[in-house]
Image (spheres, rainbow, N blue to C red):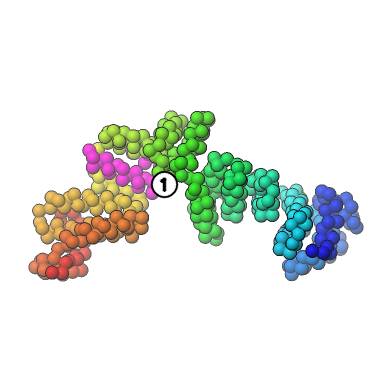
Amino acid sequence: MKLTLTLTLLLSFLALGTVNAQNGGKNCGEKVQGAYDTAKCKAQLSVFHSYVKQKSYRDAWQSWRYLYCNCSNGEAVQEWIYIGGSQMIIDSIKTIVKTVEDKEQKKTLRNAYYDTLMMVYTNWMKVYPGKEVSAYSYMGLYTYVYQNDIKAKWHDAKKYFEKSIELGGNKTSYQTVSFYLSQLQRMCKYKELDTATWIDAYFKVSDIVDFNLSEGGKYQDKWQKTREDIDAMMEPVLQCDQLIPIYDQKLEKGGLTPEELNKMVTLLKRKGCGESETYRKAAITLCDLKPTDACKEFLGDEVYKEGKYSEAQQYYKEAIELAEDNARKSDLNLKMADCALKGGGGSAASYVNTAISLNPNNGKAYMLKASLYLSTLKNCGDAFDKACGYIAVVDLYNKAKSVDPTVADACNSKIATYSKYYPKCGEVFFKTMKEGDSYTVNCLGVTVTIKCIKE
């Protein structure tokens, strides 16, 4: 690739060294004294703005060089020097990557432009202090993209992203979250970072994702896609064989906060590692420091295994009181119901109904309610009433799979079994009724729409 006017201007600009854009730089060529409202600065800004809007970046270099060196005093209109300037430099990097064939020359030119881009973002933050979150995010992004062959730069990208997240908090962009975890994934792959750090970062940004999903807004689809992407990215390392050795080391080292322990036991439980010794240690340690719903559930599970159902219920009750999420409370109420069925206190039906009211999409709750109906029907003396009771049972299984597709297979099997016990159409006719009529099942105290088996 021949040296174009654009490249000549860039290389001469790079020779300036670190430019103090706010006060003008050394060797910037013609200097303008005084405030921004000089005719020359206004004219050059107008020319530069026009070129950038037309994406005529080659023509924009000369005016931008003058503006960057002389015309940035922090006024709002002058910010275009940094915003448009970064667009121009990024376009130049893309052009280099696409058109230069010689690998060494491509790398040299790409790195020269990259260094200039980092300088522009750094000065952007100095002149406009409110732009740090965006500037650090962009620095991380373009370091990730255009310095991916330099391992030392991977650590720079990580620092830039982390600074943006630290300053931005819940206002961090979804792009920053995605690229930050992608950068950590790359570093873990090539042994530049330990997996535990990657997992810890995932939890931190997950809180940001959850906040933005709960807040609503025009970027909901983007945040939802981010949630799906980072969960898929982390899936291979969020398994028991990966998590347990990492968490064993953390527990042995000690010093974990209740928040860290709570995330640990919650993830271990969710990933099916609840039977591990690691989970037991983490839950007990957590309960000693700061009781949570997760550790109380664990203690309940432990005594449940010993057949101490009333004691287990007490732990589950405490877990419900500590839980903040209704779906979580719903699942815990199902454990209360299970204990009640096995000899604990209270009514299993009452716990199941509470579980459904807390989370109408809890398919397992409808399935358990169907099981309770089946137990009641065993003692139903009226044959027709009992047959109609099976309609209520099947209705619950249909409801369960409609709200929770994960239980569909189990429900379909139950539906195939119990729909065979519907009343025969002749029996319905004998009762002076027909299919589609309403009927109250005395054994269950519920009303169903009659369905029948044709003989």
Residue depicted at 76% across the width and 55% down the height: 104
The answer to which of 419 and 133 lies nearer the viewer is: 419
Residue depicted at 36% across the width and 34% down the height: 299
Residue 257 at what x, y percent from top left?
51, 34
Side of 24 relative to 400 (left or right):
right
Residue depicted at 39% across the width and 46% down the height: 328
Q: In which quarter of the image is residue 333?
A: top left
Q: Main secondary structure of the magenta part?
A: helix
Is 362 covered by the magenta stretch? no
Q: How crowded is mark 1: few (under 14 residues within 10 Å), some or many (20 or more)?
A: few
Side of 2 relative to 374 (left or right):
right
Across the whole image, how many numbered discs are drawn on residues?
1
The answer to which of 436 and 115 lies nearer the viewer is: 115
Q: Kindly tell me whether residue 89 is visible in this rendering.
A: no
Is 342 covered by the magenta stretch? yes
Q: In this view, does 300 lie above or below 63?
A: above
Residue 180 at what x, y percent from top left?
60, 49
Q: Name the residue under label 1.
A: 325
Q: Which region is colored magenta?
A: 317-343
The amino acid beneath tag 1 is: Asp
Q: Kindly tell me whether residue 193 is visible in this rendering.
A: yes
Residue 239 at what x, y percent from top left?
46, 44
Residue depicted at 20% across the width and 58% down the height: 418
Secondary structure beneath dot 1 equals loop
Q: In which quarter of the image is residue 101?
A: bottom right
Q: Is residue 233 above or below residue 102?
A: above
